[in-house]
Amino acid sequence: MESFEERAFWVAFHMVGHEEDARDVVQDAFIRAYAAISQFRAGRRFFTWFYRIVLHLAVDCLRKRGERTRSQEAAPDRMAREDGLADSLIREEYAGRVQDLLQHLPPRVRAILVLRDIEGVSAKDIADVIRSNPATVRWWLFLARKQFRCEWERRYGKEGPCD
Amino acid sequence: MRLNEWNIWEASPDPIPEDRPACRRWERAILLAVSGDLPPRPARTLDRHLNRCSDCLREYQLARRRREICLELALQRGKHLTDHQKGHWKGQSLWARIESAIGSPGDSNRPDPFIPSPQDRRESGRNESARGTHRGWAARLRRRSFVAASLLAAAWIAFHFSEGFSEGSRGFATPQGEERWAAQWNQFVSYVEPQGEFPRDFFSSDPKSSEFPVPEVIDF
């Protein structure tokens, strides 16, 4: 079971694609959240407020480095495991492909996919994160999945994941 | 650039090639249905279409598989962090302070930061219907019965109150109603002159000679 901090780290990692940058983003987000805790309105969900800070800082991080992607970086200690199972390797290969592909998508598309398809945040909560409404989030989700599909098929072919 | 400054129209991807066999108008529904983001009614419509269109069914399966692979990324990642790495950043101590500020985990005022874990989402994905969320036939029957009863009740109320209300307020829905009301009103307010000669024996004391029986007490 991942803790709340770990999940915030992974949101930042999937957004910026680099471990150290992700740790900096999360650490900065914690500092800012603590400094602005008085702005948090009781009764609302904390993680949507905090994820909003994380996403803002992640986008700022990407902007500071000029949208330069570090897509070749593997997940932390990804290759350290040697379990010898083909199935596990295939799964890791697919996970690496997704992480690599995410870094080639625009940040807005990446954010929607990370929150909905990887983190499992509902459309209603995503609307709370980005201060929008669920219908708009669903439209963004459609555009994001469409772009993900186009990019996936361009790289790996249409039948790629179903082999 | 802030999140709320994103222009979604700039995010429009390249159009799908025209030779794509799947029905283009079902594209949005298919891509949303794989995660249950399609409302139940469009989901059932899509389900009926998938039963007829093999190309769209294939697209649905591919989209579902792509989403499972995205979930695989969430499942694989947790195995690679050591405890040392997890505690690397200073967020641990700050999180404790934030937690105390927003309320303890058991506090009713504390907003629940619960998000289903990747394992839970994979299990729920295996257990759910093959094509998104579906309600059972009993639920559909109940909802349709409720809708039909509501429509009947609304029609009865409209029929029952339309004449009285419209005639009283002189707001007529049809010309026939206005004519009927005018006729009733004229009959009520008009003084009808007696036609012909008044019958002389009307007040005759002799009941036998009268066409009409004379009551004992005539109340005018």
Image (cartoon, helix red, strand yellow):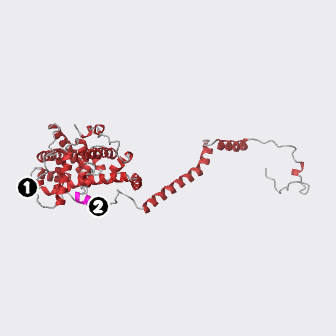
Residue at x 36%, y 54% (from the top left corner) = B57
Q: Amino acid at mark 1?
A: His
Looking at the rendering, the stretch of residues picked out in magenta corresponds to B117-123
- Residue picked out by circle 2: B126
Viewer-side residue, A153 vs B34: A153
Residue A163 as seen in the image, left or right of residue B23: left
Secondary structure mostly taken by the magenta-highlighted segment of the chain? helix
In which image quadrant can residue B105 be found? bottom left
Q: Quadrant of residue B61?
A: bottom left
Q: For residue B84, which numbered disc appears in the image?
A: 1
Label 1: chain?
B
Q: Is residue A119 visible?
A: no
Question: Residue A95: percent from the left, percent from the top?
Answer: 19, 53
Residue A98 x, y percent position in the rendering: 21, 49
Instruction: Choose the circle earlier in sequence order: 2 or 1.
Output: 1
Is residue A59 visible in the rendered image? The answer is yes
Check the residue under mark 2 and report the chain it is in. B
Neighbourhood count class around disc 2 (C-alpha, 10 Å): few under 14, some 14–19, many 20 upward: few
Quadrant into which the N terminus of chain B falls: top left
